[in-house]
Image (tube, rainbow, N blue to C red):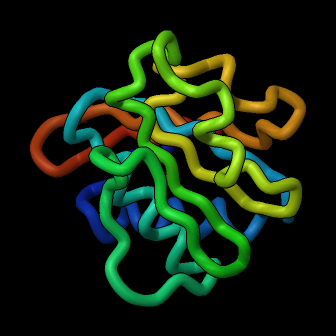
Amino acid sequence: MTEISDGPGATERAGAVLAQTLKPGDVVLVSGELGSGKTTFVRGALRALGVEGPITSPTFVVGHLYDGPLAHLDLYRLAGMGGEDPGILDPFFAPEAIVFVEWPEHAEDAVPPERIAHRVRLAHAGGDDRRIEIA
C-alpha cells in the first residue's frame, strides 16, 4: 500500500491506522532518510495504542519502553552491532511486545525476522508531503 501524506498530522494518522492491525509480538520496521517522518509515523501508532505523554526519537538512548508492552527503537547510531553487547536490545523484544524499529538496516541481525509484521518506508515527496509505503 502506498499513500501520500500532506503533513505531520496525516503521517501520524497513517501510523494510527497501521497500529489497529497489530497484535502482541509484531515488529514494524520503519525506514527512510533523515527528516522523512519516521518518528512522526511511530508517534501516531503509539498514540493509537494508548501511549500518553511525550513520544520522541530515541536516537541517543537506542530505545524507549512503554506500557502495553510497546517499544520504540532508533538504531541510527548502531551502524552495525560490531562493538555492542549482542543482548543490548533484548529488553525491547519481549515476546508480547509490539516493537517499532527506526533505521532497521543499521542492525539487521538484531530484529527477529519471524516477528516482522510490516515494513514501512517513508520518503520526501516535496514540501511537507511524504510518500508512505507499507508492506
Q: Position of residue 47 (x, y in %)?
A: 51, 79
- Compared to residue 66, the image places residue 132 above or below, namely above
Is residue 62 in view? yes
Q: Residue at x 77, y 61 (%)?
A: 97
Q: Position of residue 46 (x, y in %)?
A: 54, 71
Q: Which of 107 and 102 lies nearest the eye of the viewer?
A: 107
Quarter in which the C terminus is drawn: top right
Q: Residue at x 27, y 63 (%)?
A: 8
Q: Residue at x 55, y 21 (%)?
A: 107
Q: Position of residue 51 (x, y in %)?
A: 53, 83
Q: Is residue 58 left or right of residue 107?
A: left
Q: Which of 93 and 6 lies nearest the eye of the viewer?
A: 93
| Picture quadrant of residue 86 | top right
- Compared to residue 24, the image places residue 48 above or below, namely below
Is residue 1 in view? no
Quarter in which the N terminus is drawn: top right
Q: Position of residue 101 (x, y in %)?
A: 55, 42
Q: Is residue 106 left or right of residue 49?
A: left
